[in-house]
Image (spheres, rainbow, N blue to C red):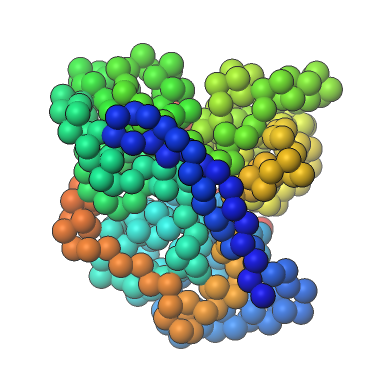
Amino acid sequence: MQRNTSFDFTLQNAQGESCVAQAWAKVRPSLDAAERFALKQRIQEALKQRNAVLIAHYYVDGDLQDLALETGGYVADSLEMARFGRNHAAETLVVAGVRFMGETAKILSPEKTVLMPDLDATCSLDLGCPADEFSAFCDAHPDRTVVVYANTSAAVKARADWMVTSSCALEIVQHLKDRGEKILWAPDRHLGRYIQEQTGADLVLWQGDCIVHNEFKSEELAMLRRAHPDARVLVHPESPAGVTAQADMVGSTSALLKAVVEGDASTYIVATDKGLFHRMRQLAPGKHLIEAPTAGESATCKSCAQCPWMAMNGLEGVLQCLTKGIGEIQVAPETQRRAHRCIDRMLEFTQQRSGTLRQGLVPHLGAV
Ligand code: SF4
């Protein structure tokens, strides 16, 4: 029987007032080794039959990450997932991640079929930034360039001038500041504050947050650092200010992975979703990785450093969407057309700057 979990997230209205709302996610039943093996075999066949490719985010289950690489697909952050999906020749993209990632893939490749293992897999940043409230917020600041994080709906992107991911947000905001532009930023307030500090740009911030990264605790991190004085601290910028302030390096998922793989330290304390540890352990097997502290697994259902919506992606869902055609992403043509501009702008910008990004992108590191 399906089990659900529920938790609170931050919702903002157009006046900048935030409130607490409730969301839910499904909990997948666990599978034994034989079931997982059988499902992987069937998915490999189905991918071939449908001329499909599997694209997985670093935060999803390790089985899906491995299967994506074993079948010629990709494991990446949201920027590189979008680019890979757009450039791949497959007729069908299976996107293992959360809904905005499937929508982005569809916006960039409207001619392709985009399937997702579970269309209910969403994101607290997306939920906390409803398109109508966001549009009113933009109307209240007509002199500002609208920059939105990838973690938003297609309708919010359709209202924006630029989309950014955590891999390229600093460079794009710096570029806009250098052109003398003032910025309206949405929806992650921690990432917005971090970018504001780093660039000195004039930003008005939407007050959303990620329920996973918002849970990292600064005092507990300070204690952990004292216990491991030689450890390097790596932090995703969706984390609170007290956590980023203690970081040796702040960066996107790709940049954190690169820092572990290429770094000369033997121990790393990492503040991001623990799904990324799967790839870190594969690519840097000799390194000691420690999860940055949250309130702990028994505190609340969102305090385990694991995104409940990313965790909804499983082998069963991938097989079902491939064989039954369910979980197809649809984006209305007008929304698609308008959202395409802001995503394309980012892809062009990062293409031109590739190799020079301050936080760095990890090139595809291949199967292990
Ligand atoms: S980890 Fe946070 S930002 Fe990423 S999908 Fe989950 S809720 Fe959204």
* Spot occupied by residue 300 in the image (x, y as percentages of width and height): 69, 43
Name the spot of residue 229 as percent of width and height, x first.
79, 19
Report the side of 157 relative to 298 (left or right): left
What is the residue that sits farthest to the top in this orientation? 200
In the figure, 304 relative to 145: above or below? below
126 or 261: nearer the viewer: 126
Q: Position of residue 270 (x, y in %)?
A: 67, 34
Tell me, yes or no, if residue 31 can be seen here: yes
What count of labels does the image hold? 0
The structure residue drawn at horizontal position 75% and vertical position 44%, both measured from the top left corner, is: 297
Q: Is residue 324 left or right of residue 60?
A: left
x%, y% of residue 317? 55, 73
Please name whichever residue, 166 or 185, is drawn nearer the observer in this view of the structure: 185
Identified at 58% across, 36% down, the residue is 213
Residue 272 vs 325, above or below: the answer is above
The residue located at (29%, 34%) in the rendering is 14
Closer to us: 248 or 219: 219
User: Would you identify the image quadrant in which residue 303 lies?
Assistant: top right
Pick whichever, 152 or 340, lies toward us.
152
Q: Residue at x 67, y 23 (%)?
A: 218
